[in-house]
Amino acid sequence: MTTIRTEPGDHPTPHIAKLFELAADLLAVVSAEGRFTLVSPSWTRLLGWREDELLAMEVLDLIHPDDHRAAVTAMQEPADGAAHRDLLVRCGTADGDWRRIAWHVRWTGDGWYAAGRDVTEHQVLAHRALHDPLTGLPNRLALGDRLSVALARQTRAGTVVAVLFVDLDHFKLINDAHGHAVGDEVLRASADRIGAALRAADTVARLGGDEFVVLAEGLAGEDEAVALAERLIAGFAAPLEVAGEQLPMTPSVGIAVARAGTGRGPEDLLREADIAMYRAKSAGRGRAALYDARMSAAVAEQQLIAGELRHALDRGELWVAYQPIVALRDGTVTGVEALLHWDHPTRGAVEPTRFIPLAEENGLVADIGAWVLDQAVQQAARWRAAGRNLTVAVNVSTHQLLDPRFP
């Protein structure tokens, strides 16, 4: 059996030396005192260190300070017969960078044999696959995994898992008015505000756009979940400082909770929290709403109406009424206000307070608003041709004001 001498500066036998020379991984022999006694040429290729530099070092000199504890634990003389160990630590390069190295070490009786593989790129790719590139938060995929684990280990009676669906109110207006670069800064600042309101064990993820989700485990009940949501909202009381400006921002939060044994899965909780979030928005924004089973029917109805509204203009179901504006001094009509109405073929008259917010939320208000303005201008022209010089007031949405086609 071939043996390797482990005194500093010693060299292995020719066959072993050739294997060391060809090895792609980092190979080393380390004394029980934690000093290198033999290293492969791959150290120079991968990390830039020369053999003489490494032999003058202790192992911990190469390892990131935050990883020292793991390294010391792994390289203690085994007392339980476990001669093989694995660890992942950051090792320094000769030019001052850090690389993540996965090590497999084996106790020799008076030291360690060690083989290490650079997994930095794998770690980066794995991180990218599970994290949002803008904020660095876990993404939808990572959240689904964590939520599944949380529900699986929810065994203590009386505790709940809570999902908080967070949507930034009027974020699109800020994005349109200030540009996407400022919008990105708002998202990063909002992620920080949300994280600051949470407990250390809570998870915050970004699903995309201006949607965030918080996962909280081990809560005493619904009241604690609501308190968490209210604390999160309170964290936005002060405007965000972005690009030298003070930008006010409020979140709407939907809350869904699950007790042990209810059999609800991750997608159930996310859907319920999303529905509750829309209830919070419809109640005035900047507030929280706890999911109730009755909300599902209401949201389904809203989605159905929104779908029907997409075709209402083409089907001639929308029309404009003109409410007189009267001078109080003499009762004369000085102008009119254009008011949009929707006569649905089966629902009858749909209140504007019900369908106009849906038009704004679903991107329909620009086309509908342009049609209303066109109708009002035509009507004003007809009145003027008939000798009635009336002003016509037309309500417009902030979404229209930010539309470059509006003027």
Image: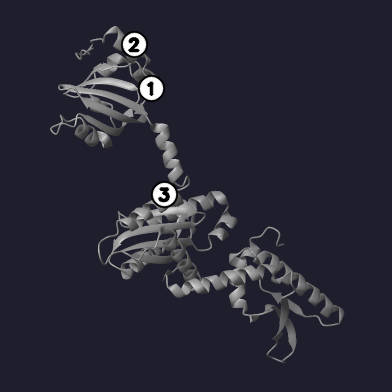
Calculate the distance from the C-alpha at mark 1 to the C-alpha at mark 3: 31 Å
Task: Count neighbours of disc 2 (C-alpha within 10 A) and say few if under 14, some if 14 to 19, many if 20 or more.
Answer: few
Question: Who is closer to the viewer here, 84 or 400?
Answer: 84
Name the residue carrying label 2: 18
Please name which of the two marks, 2 or 1, marks the residue nearer to the observer. Answer: 2
Sequence-first tag of 1 and 3: 1
Q: Which residue is mark 1?
A: 46
Q: Which amino acid does the dot numbered 3 rest on?
A: Ala
Q: Which residue is mark 3?
A: 142
Do the residues under discs 2 and 3 have CB atoms within 8 angstroms?
no
Earlier residue among tags 2 and 3 = 2
Q: Which mark is residue 229?
A: none
Check disc 3 and report its element: helix, strand or loop.
helix
Which numbered disc, 2 or 1, marks the residue that appears first in the sequence? 2
For residue 383, side relative to residue 323 (left or right): right
Q: Nearer the viewer, residue 329 or 19?
A: 19
Q: Quadrant of the N terminus?
A: top left
| Badge 3 density bin: few <14, some 14–19, many ≥20, Cα 10 Å | some
Mark 1 lies on a secondary structure that is: helix
Q: Label 1: how many residues lie within 10 Å, few (<14), some (14-19) or many (20+)?
A: some
Q: Position of residue 140 (x, y in %)?
A: 45, 52
Q: Secondary structure at mark 2?
A: helix
